[in-house]
Image (cartoon, coloured by chain):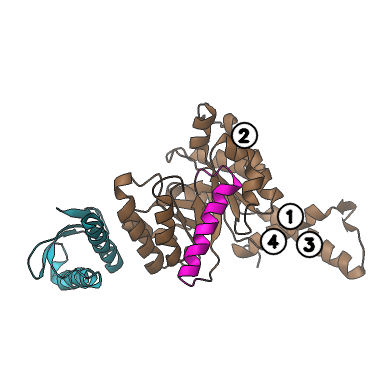
Chain colours: A cyan, B brown
């Protein structure tokens, strides 16, 4: 099952989260600011996931200049949706 | 009348568009509404309320009043909208399709619960949107439902549908309703804000509709596009002549008070208390917009 939040629109990021059986968080990121902010974006995704107790799964993200709080909101949305579905 | 902040324009921003919201304060509106209702499709309600919470917490709105329009409490989304947004401390909540005092009291009760749970002591105001015949009929009861109701807002689109009328450019079908919303609000000592002008390209229509709103007694008007804000603000600003006359009235009033006169006069004209109160309000407005050096 995949969970999506956000859109490919200016200032936003589209995130697809897929829970997996692996023991790590995998991130596939597409962004025009990879060289400058790629690592930071990955860190925000990983840290937000961990703050919700998620240590595994695949995140596919298409970024169009999302600020950190937008990233956090979008990651939180997919994780909460996944948790809700798992109940 | 309670202390009232300047609310000439309120600008709707779709809650699901982070780019628009992060620059919203630049548009000059007195009030920004992060919308969770009509501009957000049901499939995006969940994601959007999380995003709106983060916008409230992270975006600097300057002196602009930051507010949220929630979904109706009778929908599956209203309560969750409050649970998510109230802890992020909006200045006010727009309550859509309000038809009775109970519609306000339900929100008030849930907001009180959330505030208590999160130890919040900030006052959060309510701005009910009246957009049905029943709501118009109950305008005063809605306006006085809670001390935290600070403004009534009129919504023409749903209202015209509700009464089975066609929405026209002239707006005759809304005339009585608008007046009743103004009367309900003013009788309760709060502000009233007019419906939005939905045709972004019709500047003349916006101007006429805003002038009419001011004549009817509204304190402001809604905007659905940043380009509408300047026109609305300009019309609701007091004019130079209004400010000059208001200064004379207030100075005559102060003079009369100093002399212990019960009657206030300007030249040979006697000034009733409402005239003085209106003049004081104009000066207060002028000070807020920097037109009274």
| Spatial CA span between label 2 and label 3 | 33 Å
Tell me the tag on residue B250: 3
Dot 1 or dot 4, earlier in sequence:
1
Q: Are marks 4 and 3 on the same chain?
A: yes
Is label 1 or label 4 in front? Answer: 1
Q: Are marks 2 and 4 on the same chain?
A: yes
Tell me the tag on residue B278: 1
Q: Nearer the viewer, residue B13 or B133?
A: B133
Q: Give residue B104's position: percent from left, percent from top.
A: 56, 51
Is label 1 or label 2 in front? Answer: 2
Query: In the rendered view of the protein, which quadrant contains the C terminus of chain B?
Result: bottom right
Q: Secondary structure at mark 4?
A: helix
Marks 4 and 1: in contact by CB < 8 Å? no
Dot 2 or dot 3, earlier in sequence:
2
Q: Residues within 10 Å of mark 4 (few under 14, many from 20)?
A: many
Residue at 66% of width from left, 63% of height from top? B3
| Spatial CA span between label 1 and label 2 | 23 Å
Q: Is residue B167 above or below residue B245?
A: above
Q: Residues within 10 Å of mark 1 (few under 14, many from 20)?
A: some
Q: Identify residue for label 2.
A: B175
| Spatial CA span between label 3 and label 1 | 10 Å
Q: Secondary structure at mark 1?
A: helix
Tell me the chain of label 1: B
Q: Please identify the quarter of the rendering in which residue A86 is found.
A: bottom left
């Amino acid at each position: 099952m995949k969970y999506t939040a956000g859109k490919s629109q200016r200032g936003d990021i589209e995130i697809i989260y897929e829970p997996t059986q692996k023991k790590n968080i995998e991130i596939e990121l597409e962004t025009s600011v990879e060289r400058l902010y790629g690592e930071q974006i990955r860190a925000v995704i990983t840290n937000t996931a961990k703050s919700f107790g998620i240590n595994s799964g695949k995140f596919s993200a298409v970024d169009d200049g999302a600020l950190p709080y937008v990233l956090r909101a979008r990651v939180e949305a997919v994780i909460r949706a996944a948790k809700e579905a798992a109940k | 009348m309670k202390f009232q902040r300047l609310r000439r324009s309120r600008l709707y921003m779709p809650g699901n568009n982070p780019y628009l919201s992060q620059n919203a304060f630049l548009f000059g509106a007195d009030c920004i509404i992060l919308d969770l209702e009509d501009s957000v499709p049901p499939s995006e309600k969940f994601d959007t309320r999380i995003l709106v919470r983060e916008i409230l917490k992270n975006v600097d709105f300057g002196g602009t009043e930051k507010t949220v329009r929630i979904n109706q409490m009778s929908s599956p989304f209203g309560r969750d909208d409050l649970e998510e947004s109230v802890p992020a401390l909006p200045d006010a909540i727009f309550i859509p399709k309000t038809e009775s005092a109970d519609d306000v009291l339900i929100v008030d009760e849930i907001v009180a619960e959330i505030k208590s749970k999160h130890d919040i002591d900030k006052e959060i105001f309510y701005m009910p949107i009246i957009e049905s015949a029943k709501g118009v009929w109950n305008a005063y009861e809605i306006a006085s439902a809670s001390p935290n109701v600070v403004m009534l807002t009129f919504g023409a689109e749903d209202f015209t549908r509700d009464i089975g009328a066609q929405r026209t450019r002239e707006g005759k079908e809304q005339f009585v309703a608008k007046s009743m919303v103004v009367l309900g609000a003013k009788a309760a000592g709060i502000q009233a804000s007019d419906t939005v002008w939905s045709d972004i390209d019709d500047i003349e229509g916006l101007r006429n509709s805003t002038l009419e709103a001011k004549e009817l007694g509204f304190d402001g008007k809604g905007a659905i596009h940043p380009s509408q804000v300047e026109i609305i603000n300009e019309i609701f600003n007091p004019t130079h002549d209004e400010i000059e006359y208001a200064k004379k009235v207030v100075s005559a009033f102060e003079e009369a008070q100093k002399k212990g006169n019960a009657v206030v006069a300007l030249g040979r004209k006697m000034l009733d208390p409402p005239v003085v109160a209106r003049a004081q309000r104009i000066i207060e407005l002028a000070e807020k917009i920097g037109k009274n050096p």
